[in-house]
Amino acid sequence: MHVSHSLPPVIFLTCGDPAGIGPEVVAAAWSTAALHERARLRVVCDAATMADALAVAGRRATGPESYVAALEVVSESDPRASGPETLLVITPHDVPLASIAKGTITAAGGRAAVAAVETAFGLVQAGHGDAIVTGPLHKEAIHAAGRDEPGHTELLARACGLPDEAASMMLWLPPQGTEADRCGLGVVHATLHESLRSAVQHLSTDRIVEAGRRIAVLLEAVLQRQPRLAVAALNPHGGEGGLFGDEERRIIAPAVATLVSQGLDVVGPLPADTLFLRASRGSFDGVVAMYHDQGHIPIKLLGMHRAVNITLGLPIVRTSVAHGTAFDIVGSGTADPSSMQAAIDMAIRLVAAGWPPTTAVADRGASRSRP
């Protein structure tokens, strides 16, 4: 359920692990006036953590993020507009009371990160907001807190009452204005946060098809046209006709055929080492990668600090930064807020585009295959 669109959408920002740079990039991104013109932003975090983060943002030596903002704790139903001058904070439920040491992995940090996400999710489910934008959590910290979710993707899938595989991880690299990437580039993953051995074991034709459908629907909403997609091979050189493995023939090629039969513009499987080069030069709008690092490494190499993580397959809008907690630079004032700014921008765009779709992705794919 969404809030009234007679007003700008409400976007909840969570900071991830408070021991990392998440609070700092949220505080720095808050100074972006153009984002407040398009949405009403709220930070779901304890006030003390955000006060510290604002102090760090105020010490930044150069750039538009050098500013000093006030902080105000507000209720979940406060309808006011947001602006750079006052950071509006909603206190999470069950927030840890103990202070959390910066730059360290702690159970308290993991509990705080999960509490903020669960609070923001509950607020969206109750109709108080339209989207969640998350900062980086630390997976060891949430495990120390007694949770077994590998990351945000699985945490939110389970909160929605869905199995982990109902969600797909996608990285979006926004256009930068050059001829090569003027439309941006999206990469979706057919598997989740898991070891390489586990990812290969879990890889299936159905999972590749679902990932392809999900990225097709999202990119069509963003680009306002049918996207050009490519599916990556799993093995070196696309398997070399079975010399390096037969997953391309057994698993991936049938998935590509299914997606094509449903009316999508898809090619593959293509060797990943050259596929991502072609995609970076504008040959494709989206890529279906087989496992985490196959998709994450090229996108982060091309533009880590402007990339956005998007969760597909869920009945909510969730975007995130594409970087980690960066414990080694906490408090230095050097954390780059660009990915957080891009994640907020993308969340606003998705809400404006009516995302997520009201009909199931699978139903849409099936309907496209009918004459």
Image (cartoon, rainbow, N blue to C red):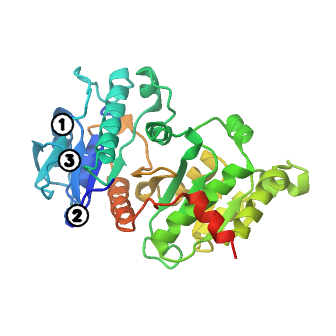
**Relative to 199, is 186 on the left or the right?**
left
Residue, disc 1? 52
**Dot 1 lies on which element?**
helix
What type is the residue that disc 2 sits on?
A: Pro
What type is the residue that disc 3 sits on?
A: Ala
Compare residues 114 and 47 and report the one nearer the observer: 114
Residue drawn at x 51%, y 55% as measured from the top left: 171
Residue 57 marker: 3
> Residue 219: x and y, percent?
52, 67
Q: Answer whether labels 3 and 2 touch (C-beta < 8 Å).
A: no
In space, the residues marked 2 and 1 are separated at their CA atoms by: 28 Å
Residue drawn at x 14%, y 59% as measured from the top left: 81
Compare residues 329 and 266 and report the one nearer the observer: 266
Q: Badge 2 local density, few (<14 within 10 Å), some, or many (20+)?
A: some
Residue, disc 2? 8
> Which of pointers 3 and 2 lies earlier in the amino acid sequence?
2
**Dot 2 lies on which element?**
loop
Q: Is residue 49 above or below residue 175?
A: above
What type is the residue that disc 1 sits on?
A: Asp
**Relative to 30, is 107 on the left or the right?**
right
> Which of pointers 2 and 1 lies earlier in the amino acid sequence?
2
In space, the residues marked 3 and 1 are separated at their CA atoms by: 9 Å
Compare residues 113 and 103 and report the one nearer the observer: 113
> Which of pointers 3 and 1 lies earlier in the amino acid sequence?
1
> Residue 289: x and y, percent?
65, 54
